[in-house]
């Protein structure tokens, strides 16, 4: 009981302290100058897709690696995988269910990552939405056959998670955030993994913990934590999404050319970074990703990098702390992260009451990434004026701000399905 109270207080105080003093007043957003997405570090104008692909894109990837997310310090592929359970009769008989364990081995260590897949029976090779969950695969649906995770999980007493272990009580607790049946009915599969299998999201007074998850598998001799330019947790989670993609290339029931990577909040930051790096992802979706995700850092609205590096010191790389309170010195800003997804479709979603994630800053990153989409002859966001609440705009860049709080809702999923239909099936939105 005492542990439980301490855990609840710790979580409450982290978010409380982190949010104290945040600016929510648009008139207090300072004047800022964004790095020019179509000008190289040497000051050369980027005028062709060729010089974007050959020069500017790699340059920006390297800057984000070095200053924000940290680079993956080596290569680590799936060593083996096992389908541990499958059924032809899932989701009211409309879907195939597969539960797959991906195993990684290196440095005498082993890491298992469990994936839950639902694939529509109506489609032979299914397009798939891929997204991490926060508390284990069994939380995304009430399906009693989904295997309970034994991994370390962040405490959440209201979800029946205490002493960092889940219980049967936590089955389906996040099902309101996962429109599984809607996806299946629309002809899409869902693949989900627990992000803590790749790297447990441990933080607290003791500081970051890099002793578990994938990091130790790529440590050099005597290394115990990543170097300042090496992968933080977001980079490790993004790496895991690419390994899921490696698996899809092996699974004949999946159309690997139609994988949509989606994430919410810290996992939205992750889906953007994964989509920026790995061009096999056909569409990238950021749901309420905020600071370090879609939101422009230089606006200093809501959460700021300095706060994030303080309260979640393991998410970004060590070098990023150099910019705490000094966003103008960052050689990149988040519109350039969106631009790295070009010319592939990207959708950025905000929520009206999620000021902490800076909805306007999330919108503007799409707007300021647009010149790169235009270079490729694609349409982006034409006007710097935010659309009305609940009025999505969809070109190659999609955006909406919906009513409500920081969350993933049916409304969000409906837009993602429309957007995917528009780009992968050629239908117009609304059809
Ligand atoms: C905190 C954090 C955000 C993050 C969010 C989440 O609010 O400050 O950056 O997006 O947690 O992932 O739930």
Image (spheres, helix red, strand yellow):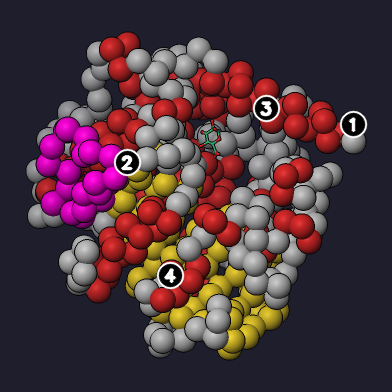
Q: Residues within 10 Å of mark 1 (few under 14, many from 20)?
A: few
Q: Quadrant of residue 143?
A: bottom right
In front here: 196 or 289? 289
Q: Residues within 10 Å of mark 3 (few under 14, many from 20)?
A: few
Q: Residue at x 33, y 21 (%)?
A: 299
Q: Residue at x 54, y 33 (%)?
A: 317
Are dots 1 and 3 in contact, CB under 8 Å?
A: no
Q: Of helix, strand and loop, which one carries label 4?
A: helix
Mark number for residue 12?
3
In front here: 58 or 285? 285
Reading the chain from its start, which is encountered first: label 2 or label 3?
3
Mark number for residue 401?
2
Q: CA distance from mark 2 to mark 3?
A: 26 Å
Q: Residue at x 60, y 55 (%)?
A: 174
In front here: 39 or 290? 290
Q: Residue at x 58, y 59 (%)?
A: 175
Q: Which residues are magenta?
A: 379-399
Reading the chain from its start, which is encountered first: label 1 or label 3?
1
Q: CA distance from mark 4 to mark 1?
A: 42 Å
Q: Residues within 10 Å of mark 2 (few under 14, many from 20)?
A: many
List x then y, in percent, for residue 119: 49, 78
Can residue 381 be seen?
yes
């Amino acid at each position: 009981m005492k542990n439980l109270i301490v855990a609840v207080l710790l979580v409450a105080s982290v978010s409380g302290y982190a949010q104290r003093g945040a600016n929510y007043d648009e008139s207090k957003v300072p004047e800022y100058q964004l790095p020019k997405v179509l000008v190289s570090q040497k000051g050369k104008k980027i005028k062709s897709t060729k010089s974007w692909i050959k020069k500017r894109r790699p340059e920006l990837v390297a800057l984000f690696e070095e200053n924000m997310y940290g680079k993956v310090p080596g290569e680590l592929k799936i060593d083996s995988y096992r389908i541990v359970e499958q059924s032809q009769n899932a989701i009211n008989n409309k879907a195939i269910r597969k539960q797959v364990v991906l195993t990684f081995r290196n440095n005498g260590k082993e890491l298992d990552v469990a994936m839950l897949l639902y694939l529509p029976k109506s489609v032979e090779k299914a397009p798939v939405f891929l997204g991490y969950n926060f508390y284990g695969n069994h939380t995304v649906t009430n399906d009693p056959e989904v295997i309970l995770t034994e991994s370390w999980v962040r405490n959440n007493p209201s979800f029946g998670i205490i002493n960092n272990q889940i219980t049967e009580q936590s089955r389906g607790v996040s099902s309101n955030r996962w429109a599984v049946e809607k996806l299946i009915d629309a002809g899409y599969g869902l693949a989900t993994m627990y992000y803590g299998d790749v790297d447990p999201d441990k933080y607290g007074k003791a500081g970051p913990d890099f002793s578990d998850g994938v990091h130790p598998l790529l440590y050099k001799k005597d290394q115990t934590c990543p170097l300042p330019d090496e992968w933080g947790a977001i980079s490790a989670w993004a790496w895991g999404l690419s390994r899921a993609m490696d698996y899809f290339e092996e699974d004949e029931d999946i159309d690997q050319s139609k994988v949509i990577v989606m994430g919410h909040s810290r996992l939205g930051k992750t889906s953007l970074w994964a989509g920026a790096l790995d061009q096999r992802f056909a569409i990238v979706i950021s749901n309420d990703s905020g600071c370090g995700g879609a939101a422009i850092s230089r606006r200093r609205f809501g959460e700021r990098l300095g706060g994030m590096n303080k309260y979640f010191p393991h998410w970004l790389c060590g070098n990023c702390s150099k910019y705490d309170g000094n966003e103008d010195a960052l050689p990149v800003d988040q519109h350039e992260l969106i631009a790295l997804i070009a010319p592939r479709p990207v959708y950025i979603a905000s929520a009206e009451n999620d000021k902490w994630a800076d909805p306007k800053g999330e919108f503007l990153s799409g707007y300021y990434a647009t010149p790169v989409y235009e270079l490729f002859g694609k349409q982006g966001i034409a006007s710097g004026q935010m659309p009305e609440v609940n009025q999505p705009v969809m070109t190659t860049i999609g955006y909406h701000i919906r009513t409500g709080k920081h969350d993933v809702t049916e409304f969000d999923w409906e837009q993602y399905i429309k957007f995917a239909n528009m780009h992968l099936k050629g239908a117009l939105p609304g059809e």
